Image: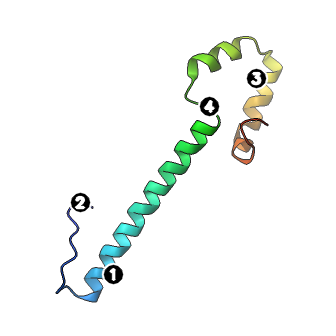
Amino acid sequence: ISELEFVPGESEAERTSKLEVLAAYNATLDERQRRRDFVEKHSLLDLARSELEAKDVPPAEVSLREQLRPYNRYQSAEE
């Protein structure tokens, strides 16, 4: 990406391909930011706190949480 250079005399095909590369890179950055926001929103980086909380949880609830984990993205952190 850092080596992409738009030169005034280049063809439309070259310009289009460079813009497509930039769009793909931008989509990657957007997805990365979306994932960071998710981790931050659900407080997933505080592993020490999560481990302490997990020690006090009964095994049945741990099992239930594991089964419901795929649905976390549809809920807010408070839910």
- Label placed on residue 62: 3
Residue 2: name its quadrant: bottom left
Tell me the SS state at disc 1.
Answer: helix
Q: How is the image coloured?
A: rainbow
Distance of mark 3 from mark 4, alpha carbons? 18 Å
Going by the picture, which residue comes out furthest to the right? 60
Label 4 Cα crowd, 10 Å radius (few <14 / some 14-19 / many 20+) = few
* Label 2 vs 1, first from the N-terminus: 2
Percent x, y of residue 63: 77, 26
Tell me the SS state at disc 4.
Answer: loop
**Residue type at tag 2:** Ser
Q: Which residue is mark 4?
A: 43
Q: Is residue 50 left or right of residue 13?
A: right
* Label 3 vs 1, first from the N-terminus: 1
Tell me the SS state at disc 3.
Answer: helix
Residue 51: name its quadrant: top right
Q: Which residue is mark 2?
A: 2
Q: Is residue 71 above or below residue 17?
A: above
**Residue type at tag 1:** Thr
Q: Which residue is mark 1?
A: 16
Quadrant location, the N terminus = bottom left
* Label 4 vs 1, first from the N-terminus: 1
Distance of mark 2 from mark 1, alpha carbons? 17 Å
Q: Is residue 59 above or below residue 69?
A: above
Q: Is residue 4 left or right of residue 52?
A: left
- Label placed on residue 7: none
Distance of mark 2 from mark 4, alpha carbons? 33 Å
Label 3 Cα crowd, 10 Å radius (few <14 / some 14-19 / many 20+) = few
* Label 2 vs 4, first from the N-terminus: 2
Distance of mark 3 from mark 1, alpha carbons? 51 Å
